[in-house]
Amino acid sequence: MSTASLVSGTSFSMLENFSFRTIVEYLPLFGQGLVTTVWLSALSFAGALAVGIVLAAMSLQRGWLFRVPAKAYIDAVRATPLLAQLYFLYFGLPHLGFVLPELVVGILALSLNSGAYVAEIIRAGILSIPRGQVEAGVASGMTYVQRMRLVILPQAFKVTIPPLLGQAIVLVKDSALLSLISVSELTRAGQLLASDRFMPAEGFITIAAFYLLLYYGLKGLAALSGRWLGLQPARSST
Amino acid sequence: MTASPSKNGTGMIEFRGVNKWFGALNVLRDITLSVEPREVVVVCGPSGSGKSTLIRCINGLETIRDGDLVVDGQRLGDPATNMTRLRTEIGFVFQSFNLYPHRTALENVTLAPIHVRKIPRNEAEQAGRELLAKVGLADKVHAYPAQLSGGQQQRVAIARCLGMRPKIMLFDEPTSALDPEMISEVLDVMVAVAEEGMTMMVVTHEMGFARKVAQRVVFMDAGAIVESGTPEEFFSQPKTDRSRAFLSKILRH
Amino acid sequence: MIWQQLQSLVGSYPLALRGLGVTVVLSLISLVLGTLLGFGLGILRTGGNRLISAAIGAWVDLIRGTPFLVQIFLIFFILPEFGIELDAFTAGIIALTNLAACFICEIVVAGIRSVPTGQVEAALASGLSRWQRMRQVVLPQAMRIVLPPLVGQYVLLIKDSSVVSAIGLTDLTRVGWLVVQRVPNGLLVFFLVGLGYFIVCYPLIMLARRLERRMGAAHGEVQL
């Protein structure tokens, strides 16, 4: 359930005894954890994009019917911790009769959480397009959908890529929380090594290194996309 | 190439064989120049000729690669020279004013006197008010830079320099960023400062100003001093093709 | 049944209040320490010393690149191996302060870099020392850029404090976790937990937005 059980065991090995052998021994477990973290993050990010696009579209409406619920949802997500949201679903869904595997609950939580931030990024991207562009579209007789598809979105797409990659970095790091509902991802692998063999240093330093690998990968991608799109170096708020 | 070096190095500002590069670009070439106390020297030349770089070296906003630059008897780049102390003796007026936008005109003038010179606040403010009155801005003491016109901002900037009671004043194209109708109000203040006996180096194309107060005009091109002489000599009988070409361009207007 | 659950929840009210207290105190201490440290690091990072600057940059990247949960585990389980015994609360404060300092460092660096070089040159030309330039000229102008994301960072900090429940600290999230074992209505329990965070965080989010608008408007008034 939680890792509170780890608290009881104190001072194990000294760092001089840092055991690379055990790390190698556990490497398949770490590998599995890394793979799980990658694909569950990818899946969650896809979900977040879907949620985000819908929320952004809703929040840009003039009428309150869509706008107000979308904004309320975004604010509620932004003002509460992911962990509380995760527990809300984990302990709450069974209460409603949905008994889902932990992994599915985790992906759901990450998608719904990140979706709110993605919505803000997309909204800001669309609003960053100068009013004159909309007016030019109107002047040449385009409909709302045509203006969006032909004028606004292609331009907005460009400015949203770097912050979206920043959000992807946040999502990968956030996915570590799924270990607290026993999803066998990367952090869970570190916890297992820590608790099975009483080797927290080996376990947590190794997974930290793996996360850094993912971080630098995504960060490099963000920088690359920025250059590729001819933007300033990405300053994401990760 | 040589612009009347002083015989034994008693000048307020002494360049001796100064060179500077930006990467591969030789922006200052073998500069030798001496400015006497109370002298007013106007530096002109086409853009990119190195004239701004020249005066920015004097207070260490730029560093030199080789040669000697001695200001008020202190050699720049010498570990014994306290650059911060030396800068308090040199006022610098920027093309873009660079007033502190979060401080009023008076606060702009008193900031350095209070924090660097350690003058008591009320004394500094008294002096600051007098200086602002002197540049014709007695009624703008509490205005923020954003509330002032360009000409007014530049006059505050000059008052800010004078507040430090400098021995030398450097002006880097002080009127280039101004609307035409505001140029004379700034030049009038500069003339007044010059007439009080300040040692000045002024990068400007305002030839009227040069005629009025400059003892010497220095013409630069491609990082080198090409010509130097009194304003009369320079304007009536420019010696080189490059200075003639330059003068014909700026005097046409 | 829901009535019984509510009664049971009311019984947990003192525990919930204590949890909220722990969350607020933990966040507040880390916020103050993290801000001080973050400004210090940011100023050092933009200072002239390349070695210090690179070292801070590397550390910030290390912290930004790893999950906060992993950082807490590292501090809580590994520092004792160096003979530093920590309770969960102290470990939480160290982890949160460090996290906040790293993010605030980046915010401060961006703010300092946003100040035009002419401002520094003007201060330099009038003989202000390095610290005076920072204190009198650069920081006051940088604050316009720094303030909105700084408040946003405080919101993140309060939310991140929930992760400290993973090492057994009885904060608001941990209280929810404890209560839900007795009252098996996860929706209700964690709705209330969420509400607790919302009450603290939402005003800060509003403040950040307001600052952003105000600072954005002030931006246009700058000379030239």
Image: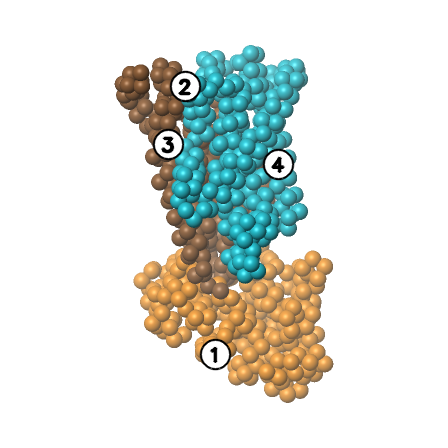
Which residue is at a point 67% across and 62% down the rendered structure image?
A: B20
Q: Specify whether B220 is left or right of B124.
A: right
C84 or B149: nearer the viewer = B149
Q: Are marks 1 and 4 on the same chain?
A: no
Q: Position of residue B70 (x, y in %)?
A: 59, 65
Residue B119 figure quarter: bottom left
Which residue carries the number 3 mark? C197
Q: Is residue A202 above or below residue B117?
A: above
Which residue is at a point 51% across and 29% down the rendered structure image?
A: A110
A209 or C81: nearer the viewer = A209
Q: Which chain letter goes with mark 1? A: B
Whether residues under marks 2 and 4 lie with C-beta atoms below 8 angstroms apart, the answer is no
Q: CA distance from mark 1 to mark 4?
A: 55 Å
Q: Is residue C122 above or below residue A152?
A: below
Q: Amino acid at mark 2?
A: His
Q: Position of residue C17 (x, y in %)?
A: 30, 25
The mark lying in front, picked from 1 and 4, is 4
Q: CA distance from mark 2 to mark 1?
A: 78 Å
Which residue carries the number 4 mark? A218
Q: Amino acid at mark 3?
A: Tyr
Q: Colour of chain B?
A: orange
Secondary structure category for the residue under label 2: helix
